[in-house]
Amino acid sequence: MHQRIISTQNHQNRRGVSTLDYVLVLGVVMPLAVIVVPTSIRIVRAAYEMVVVMIAWPFM
């Protein structure tokens, strides 16, 4: 019975945690994704160009 009281108290202390999760996703993760996706596309494109140059260079 003592453990049931403790688990109920923990549940009451975590009342706004899911709202905080949404705020973190919208305020932190989404802006990071907006920055990282175009940057990663640019990095992949540069790596592709380097590989093409390394392969094509002996034949030029």
Image (tube, rainbow, N blue to C red):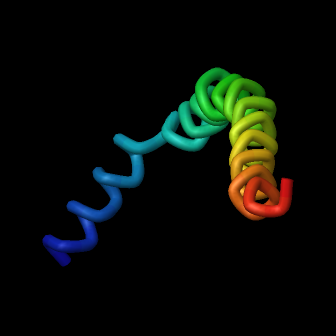
Q: Nearer the viewer, residue 3 or 47?
A: 47
What residue is shown at x 29% (from left), y 64% (from top)?
A: 7
Picture quadrant of residue 30: top right
Picture quadrant of residue 18: top right
Q: Is residue 20 above or below residue 47?
A: above
User: How many marks overall?
Assistant: 0
Q: Nearer the viewer, residue 60 or 48?
A: 60
What residue is shown at x 76% (from left), y 54% (from top)?
A: 57
What residue is shown at x 74% (from left), y 40% (from top)?
A: 46
Residue 58, percent from left and from top: 74, 61
What residue is shown at x 70% (from left), y 48% (from top)?
A: 50
Q: Nearer the viewer, residue 42 or 38?
A: 42
Residue lying farthest to the bottom in this orientation: 1
Residue 2, percent from left and from top: 14, 71
Residue 21, percent from left and from top: 57, 39
Q: Nearer the viewer, residue 19 or 28?
A: 28
Quarter of the image with the N terminus is bottom left
Residue 60, percent from left and from top: 85, 53
